[in-house]
Image (spheres, grey):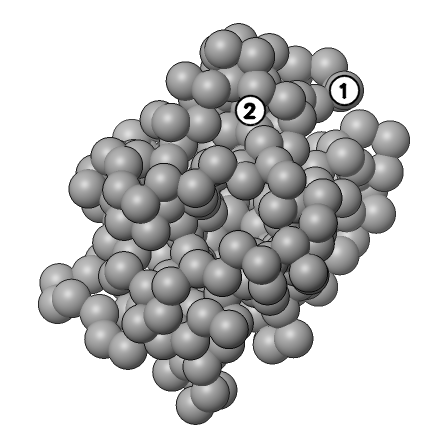
Amino acid sequence: MSEAGGEWDGQLLADISPELAGRVIFLEECASTNDEARRLADLGAAHGTLVLAEKQTAGRGRRGQAWACPVGEGIACSLIIRPEAPTPLWSRIAIATGLGVAESLDLPVEVKWPNDLWLNGKKLCGILVESTGNAVVVGIGMNVNVKKFPEGLAHPATSILLETGTPASREVVLAGMIERVIYRTSQIEGEFGSLISSWNTRCALRGKLIRCLRDGKPITGMMEGLSLSGELLLRNTEGLQRILQADEIRLV
């Protein structure tokens, strides 16, 4: 079993999920799992193919922010999704991914729009979604058994180990979250209303005063959750604002 500082156990992963194990492309080291997955997607890699790396030398998050994943302590992977839904709905995949990963953990994990995961007020997981051709690449960085984080992070971070006091099996965490992500991303068309309802119950910022940047301009208001089409609902003195994209979302 993989514990803090351990190596990936391919046989354990196969025992947990033979289907997933058969789709994993394991790399000891790469620049970015998202870049590798995009390359493979462009070459025709199938839906559900997973690129899993022990070490990334140029891992990144949203807006190009660096993402560090200590060797043997976290999960750095990218999943290739080939949606059946129309292209205009693909932006919903980020929301579906965040919810799926949160639901896969037996912990009170909250989602922070558009797709970060928080546990006890600290960042547990980052998600980066990028499209390429007729596929979407979902990058997931999960802090599983990370013991210490570098100084100067934009947000306080945590791991499953730090919150529970017990090392977790990376194989179990990986299999559970990928299974749930594939399920939730299949709901971005006909069942999106149900997905949004579940997302709103886990929303870390719902009912709180927040500030964000929209088109480079600050906007402040009370976060009311997401609309049935996936927009952030923010109420202020100008009424109800519907925000599809925004940067630097912070509590006031």
From what the image shows, is residue 245 above or below residue 132? below
Q: Check disc 1 and report its element: helix, strand or loop.
A: loop
**Image quadrant in which you'd find residue 105:** bottom right
In the orientation shown, which residue stands out farthest toward the front?
11
In the rendered structure, the answer to whether residue 81 lies left or right of residue 196 reads left
How many numbered discs?
A: 2
The reply to whether residue 251 is in sight is no
Q: Position of residue 150 (x, y in %)?
A: 15, 66
In the orientation shown, which residue stands out farthest toward the left?
151
Q: Is the residue under label 1 in contact with that under label 2 (CB below 8 Å)? A: no
Residue pictured at 33% horizontal, 51% vertical: 54
From what the image shows, is residue 28 above or below residue 109? above
User: Counting other residues with Cα less than 10 Å from the Cα at mark 2, is it few (<14), some (14-19), or many (20 or more)?
Assistant: many
Q: Position of residue 92 (x, y in %)?
A: 64, 33
User: Label 2 amino acid?
Assistant: Val
**Image quadrant in which you'd find residue 77:** top left
C-alpha span from label 2 to label 1: 11 Å
The reply to whether residue 189 is in sight is yes
User: Label 1 amino acid?
Assistant: Glu
In the rendered structure, the answer to whether residue 85 lies left or right of residue 115 reads right
Q: Position of residue 144 (x, y in %)?
A: 43, 68
Residue pictured at 64% horizontal, 54% vertical: 14
User: Counting other residues with Cα less than 10 Å from the Cα at mark 1, is it few (<14), some (14-19), or many (20 or more)?
Assistant: some
Residue pictured at 57% horizontal, 19% vertical: 45
User: Is 58 in front, or is 120?
Assistant: 58
Residue pictured at 36% horizontal, 40% vertical: 27
**Pointer 2 residue:** 136
**Image quadrant in which you'd find residue 224:** bottom right
Q: Earlier in the sequence, mark 2 or mark 1?
A: 1
**Pointer 1 residue:** 84
Q: Check disc 2 and report its element: helix, strand or loop.
A: strand
